[in-house]
Image: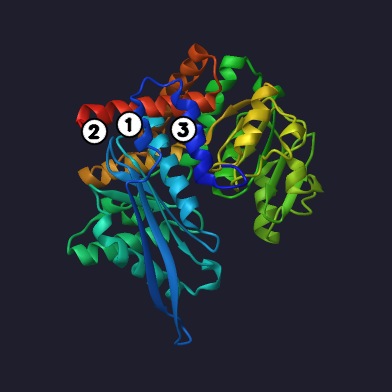
């Protein structure tokens, strides 16, 4: 989570948080290493008849609290250190939210935008064919991530079911509703983040009608978060996507911004705001700043320029380790990714439970259960932070370490 090596930085964070956790040091050491790292090569016959080899990974970090769980990303910059880091974060995220999963992550080095649908489908099938023996409903359950979606999850379910010779919807989450997906999964990350933010605002006595928000990232999570917060009466002053950013201190209607983006391909030149750079958006004076796109956008270089009261990390690892220290010294609160964006894995857990029982819940049931989980997780982390007088990042990670260590010790894994 810093500019150098993301996994090395995570290890440093584990060491720092472990000082506040009631945990055997030997068990803490095991959390610094993934239990399995799988590298595969996937030959794919392209539409032009040429065969191209793609490299893929699946990292299984820890399963002391339950089956491995984590997304699969298709991206040209995928690398093993990134996947190891994200797998470990999934372990801690599942523990913080208190669901019976461990952590995993997968990825394929590919620019999926350059593939036809036929090529993308066969690449997905080839990846699952290579990792089939390592995944399963009781072993490791994949999910969507960067540049993967519900359609790709349906292909994963179908390929796994075909090889296993049995219908296995519970092998993967984030599927389309027509393929036994869960209601509420598409908005779960945003809904969970907003729930946690609302709990935080209660502790600080914020007036929603006088609260401003800037969101860097206008994809699924950022867009939904903007619309929910706007509907709650908060003022959205800034939005950014890959094409640039817009800012208006008087407020932006995210529903209108969405229409503009659909029509024009980006937020740029939206009449309701002034064009600025995505980097500059992070430095605007707002009450709440939400990085909801890329990793490592708040760094040592710009942390001193951040002008907000609280940062809510919807993106995975958007804040570097050095930036974290600067923000903490400056008194800027931060709700960490392993808590703030845990809504996605929580509803993934709900989907897995529904798939196993073949009993499917209403949207209201999913929303109610999600709110219950997120509220309890925030309360636990906030109480831990207050008791230990530490940041919520350290508190969330320390709490997760404690829970994983207790499960590990109870199982006698190191005895």
| Residue 184 visible in rendering | no
| Residue 276 visible in rendering | yes
Q: Residues within 10 Å of mark 2 (few under 14, many from 20)?
A: few
Horizontal and vertical percent for residue 238? 73, 40
Alpha carbons under labels 2 and 3: distance apart:
19 Å
CB under 8 Å between discs 2 and 1: yes
Horizontal and vertical percent for residue 2? 60, 42
Alpha carbons under labels 2 and 1: distance apart:
8 Å
Lower sequence index among marks 2 and 3: 3
Horizontal and vertical percent for residue 239? 70, 43
Q: Residue at x 41, y 46 (%)?
A: 87
Q: Residue at x 37, y 56 (%)?
A: 58
- Left or right: residue 383 versus residue 323 is left
Horizontal and vertical percent for residue 250? 79, 34
Asked whether 99 or 295 is in front, the reply is: 295
Where on the picture, by quarter, is residue 61?
top left
Q: Which residue is mark 3?
A: 14
Q: Which residue is mark 2?
A: 414
- Quadrant of the drawing holding the C terminus: top left
Asked whether 114 or 363 is in front, the reply is: 114
Lower sequence index among marks 2 and 1: 1
Q: Is residue 289 above or below residue 255?
A: above
- Quadrant of the drawing holding the N terminus: top right
Q: Residues within 10 Å of mark 3 (few under 14, many from 20)?
A: some
Secondary element at image label 2: loop
Secondary element at image label 3: helix
Lower sequence index among marks 3 and 1: 3
Query: Which numbered tag is attached to residue 27?
Result: 1
Q: Residues within 10 Å of mark 1 (few under 14, many from 20)?
A: some
Secondary element at image label 1: helix
- Left or right: residue 161 versus residue 18 is left
């Amino acid at each position: 989570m810093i500019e150098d090596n993301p996994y090395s930085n995570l290890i440093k964070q584990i060491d720092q948080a472990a000082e506040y956790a009631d945990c055997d040091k030997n068990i803490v050491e095991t959390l610094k290493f993934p239990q399995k790292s799988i590298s595969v090569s996937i030959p794919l016959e392209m539409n032009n008849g040429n065969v191209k080899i793609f490299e893929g990974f699946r990292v299984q970090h820890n399963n002391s609290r339950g089956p491995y769980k984590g997304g699969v990303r298709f991206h040209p910059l995928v690398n093993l250190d990134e996947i190891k880091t994200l797998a470990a974060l999934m372990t801690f995220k599942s523990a913080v939210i208190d669901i019976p999963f461990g952590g995993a992550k997968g990825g394929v080095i590919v620019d999926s935008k350059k593939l036809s649908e036929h090529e993308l489908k066969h690449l997905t099938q080839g990846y699952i064919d290579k990792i089939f023996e390592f995944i399963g409903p009781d072993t490791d359950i994949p999910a969507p991530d960067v540049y993967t979606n519900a359609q790709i999850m349906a292909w994963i379910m179908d390929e796994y079911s075909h090889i296993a010779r049995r219908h296995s919807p519970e092998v993967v989450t984030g599927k389309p509703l027509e393929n036994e997906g869960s209601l509420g999964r598409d908005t779960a990350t945003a809904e969970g983040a907003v729930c946690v933010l609302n709990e935080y605002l209660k502790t600080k006595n914020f007036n929603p009608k006088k609260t401003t928000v800037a969101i860097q990232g206008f994809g699924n999570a950022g867009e939904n978060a903007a619309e929910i917060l706007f509907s709650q009466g908060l003022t959205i002053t800034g939005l950014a996507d890959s094409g640039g950013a817009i800012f208006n201190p008087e407020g932006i209607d995210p529903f209108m911004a969405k229409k503009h983006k659909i029509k024009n391909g980006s937020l740029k030149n939206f009449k309701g705001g002034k064009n600025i750079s995505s980097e500059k958006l992070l430095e605007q004076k707002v009450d709440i700043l939400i990085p909801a796109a890329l990793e490592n956008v708040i760094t040592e270089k710009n942390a001193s320029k951040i002008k907000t009261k609280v940062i809510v990390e919807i993106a995975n690892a958007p804040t570097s380790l050095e930036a974290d220290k600067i923000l903490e010294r400056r008194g800027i609160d931060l709700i960490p990714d392993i808590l703030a964006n845990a809504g996605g894995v929580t509803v993934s857990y709900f989907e897995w439970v529904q798939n196993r029982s073949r009993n499917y819940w209403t949207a209201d049931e999913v929303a109610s259960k999600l709110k219950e989980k997120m509220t309890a997780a925030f309360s636990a982390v906030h109480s831990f932070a207050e008791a230990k007088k530490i940041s919520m990042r350290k508190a969330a990670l320390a709490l997760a370490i404690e829970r994983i260590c207790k499960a590990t010790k109870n199982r006698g894994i190191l005895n």
